[in-house]
Image (tube, rainbow, N blue to C red):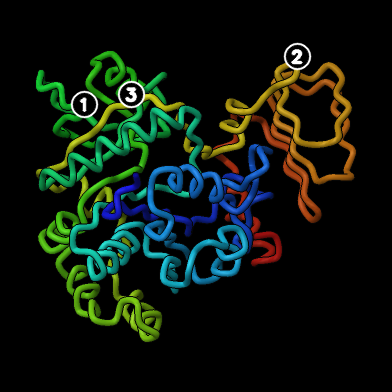
Amino acid sequence: MKNRNHYVVIMAGGIGTRFWPVSRVQFPKQFHDILGRGQTLIQETYNRFASFIPEENIYVVTNARYQKLVKQQLPALTDDQILLEPIGRNTAPCVAYAAYKIHARNPEGILVVAPSDHLIKKEEVFKEKILLGLRACAQNDIIMTLGINPTRPDTGYGYIQYIEDNQGRGYYKVKTFTEKPKLEVAKSFIESGDFVWNGGIFLFSARAIMQAYEEYLPDMAELFSDIRHIYYTPEEQAAINNLYSTCKNISIDYGIMERAENVHVIPADFGWSDLGTWGSVHENMEKDYHGNTVQATAVVYDSFNNVVHAPNGKLVVLKGLEDFIVVDTKDALLICKKEEEQFIKQIVGDIKNQFHDKYN
C-alpha cells in the first residue's frame, strides 16, 4: 500500500542546452523521447514514481511557459500539482516552493525531489533505496541524498564523501561535497572508496527542509512562509509571480546541502545516467555492430561509434565517420566530434548572440 505521507517533486524547468538542436527553449529535453523508448523523459520519471507514490502526491515544478506541455504529457496532474515558476531562479526556490506548499496541506509530508530527465535502468533497486530514504527521513530529523557509486573518474559530476560506519543502516553521514573536480582529484576520490557521485536526488521531511531554509536561507524561507495561507487557492499563482524575482538565484546544493550538518547519503547503483549529453545517449542506447547509435532512417558505410538522430522521413547517409554526433532537425543540423560535445553549450550561446532566439 502506498504511504499517503510520501510525496515526489519532479523538477522540470531546465532547457537541456547540450541537447541542441533537439532541445530548445520552447520544447526542452525533458519533453522529448530522447532514447526512443516510447515515452518522454518526464513521462518515464512520473511513471517510475507513480508505481509506489500516490499519484495525487506527485508534483511538478516547471517554468510557466511549459504548463501546456506538462498538461499534455502528464494529464493525470491537477493544476494544484503543477507549480509554475515565472522565471528561473535555480533549484533552491523551486524546492522551497514545493516544500512549503506541501507542508501547508500535510505537515507530516516526506518528500523526494528528483530531476525530470534522468535515466534509471534498475527501477526496483531505485524504489528500494528511495523507500529506505523516506523511512529514515520520517524517523529522523535528517536531509538525505542518493549517491551514485562511481564507475570512472568523471570530471562532469559533483562528488560526495561520506563517513563510513558499521551501523548497517544503508546510509551514512556526509563529510564533504566537491563540485566537478579536476581529473587527478577525481581519480583520487575513486581510489579512496568513500566518494559517490551527486545524482541530484534529495529526500527530507517538509518540516526538516523548512528548518534548513530558516537557518541557511532565511530570506527565502520568509517569502514562502508568508504566503502559506494562499497555497491551494486561486491567489497562489499571483503571489508566486510577485515574490519569485526577489528570491536569491542559488541551487539547493550550495544553499542548503553543503552547509547543513544533518545531511546523509545512500550509496547506490541503480543504473543511473543524468543523460546530460548526446554522448550519454550513445552510452545508454542499443548500438549497431559498428557501435553506432542511430535514431533515423540511415545508410551507414565504414562509420563507427557515432550518434545519429534525424526526423522521420529524412534519409541520413554516413561514410567514413568515427566518433561523431550528427543531429538533424527541421531548421538546424549539428555535426560535432563526440570529444568536443562540451562545446555545444558555447555554440548555443554564440548562435543566440548572432541570430537571437531564431534557433534557440
Residue to which mark 1 is pinned: 170
Three-letter amino acid code at disc 2?
A: Tyr
User: Residue at the location (61% across, 36% down)?
Assistant: 278
CA distance for labels 2 and 3:
32 Å
**Residue placed farthest to the front in the image?**
1
The amino acid pointed to by label 1 is Gly
Q: Is residue 272 above or below residue 313?
A: above
User: On residue 186, which mark appears?
Assistant: 3
Crowd tier of the residue under label 3, counting other residues whose Cα lies within 10 Å: few below 14, some 14–19, many 20 or above: many
Q: State left or right for residue 29 relative to residue 211.
A: right
How dense is the environment of label 1, judged by Cα within 10 Å: few (below 14), some, or many (20 and up)?
A: some
Frontmost of labels 1 and 2 is 1
Circle 2 residue: 289
Instruction: Kindly indicate the quadrant of the structure image that contains residue 59.
Output: bottom left
Q: Earlier in the sequence, mark 1 or mark 3?
A: 1
Q: Nearer the viewer, mark 2 or mark 3?
A: 2
Instruction: Residue 195: give x, y in percent of width and height.
Output: 26, 24
* Element class at badge 1: loop
